[in-house]
Amino acid sequence: MYVIGLTGGIGSGKSTVAQMLEGKGAALLSADAVGHEVYLLDQPAWREVVEAFGQRIVAQDGAIDRKKLGAIVFSDPEQLRRLNAITHPRMKEMMREKLEEERTRGARVAVLEAALLFDAGWDDLTDEVWVTMAPPEVAAARTAERSGLSLEEALARVKAQMSNEERAARSQVIIDTDCPLERTRKQVDEEWQRLLARLETPSARSGV
């Protein structure tokens, strides 16, 4: 099974491209979904997070209140690093297991969609990386429109992330989303056909 890592900043069109790839038959694994799972009551990270941040983040039903936790970590970089040190390795193992499940099911191509693919060191789970890119102002406008944040708040979030240039330098495929949707779709179609052609060659195997 060949694994595409799909990354990009907030508002870059990553989820749209992920859906296009899923429509072509790729198995889709979202790091956001795994991120929700890692906080569940029966997961090992639950105990570690509660020990680190206290009972104040536990809701009445025993689940971690992500809003309360977010208020703590997003206002303090050190606390965010502390949380990431707990959750990122757990998430990586969960994603590794889910990719193996897709491999067992016989999937030919899987897509691991993760905004933090490089930041968290998850790119070694993939065979190549695709990145979605839009100018910071465009990404911020999209984010503000869908989230209710002000444009200034959205732009601050965009600029707090890894830059487009750094992501692009570490990726094999760049999808420009600062264009009409059909143009983005055409780019995905073309790159998908190139990928399938590579997979037909003897040397195109997982890990190469």
Image (cartoon, rainbow, N blue to C red):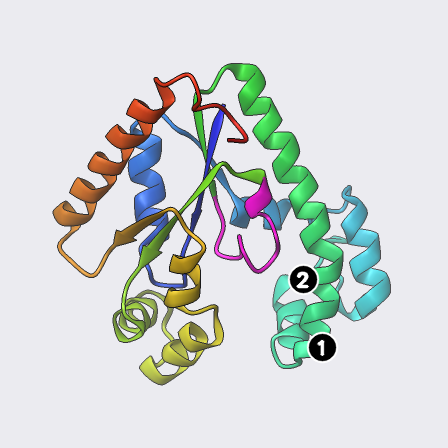
Please tell me whether residue 203 belongs to the stretch shown in magenta: no
- Residue at horizontal 61 percent and vertical 56 percent from the top: 120
Q: Quadrant of residue 189?
A: top left
Q: Quadrant of residue 100?
A: top right
The residue under label 2 is which amino acid type? Asp
**Image height of 173 relative to 160, above or below:** above
Q: Secondary structure at mark 1?
A: helix
- Left or right: 200, with 41 as reference point: left
Q: Which residues are magenta?
A: 113-124
Across and down, in percent, residue 168 comes to 38, 58
Q: Earlier in the sequence, mark 1 or mark 2?
A: 2
The residue under label 1 is which amino acid type? Glu
Across and down, in percent, residue 186 comes to 16, 41
Across and down, in percent, residue 64 comes to 71, 58
Asked whether 190 or 16 is in front, the reply is 190
Across and down, in percent, residue 53 comes to 80, 69
Let me know if residue 108 appears in the view: yes
Dominant secondary structure, magenta = loop
Asked whether 32 or 126 is in front, the reply is 126
Packing grade of label 2 (10 A; few <14, some 14-19, many >=20) is: some
Let me know if residue 60 appears in the view: no
Q: Which residue is mark 1?
A: 78
Q: Secondary structure at mark 2?
A: loop
Please tell me whether residue 115 belongs to the stretch shown in magenta: yes
- Residue at horizontal 31 percent and vertical 68 percent from the top: 139
- Residue at horizontal 64 percent and vertical 44 percent from the top: 37
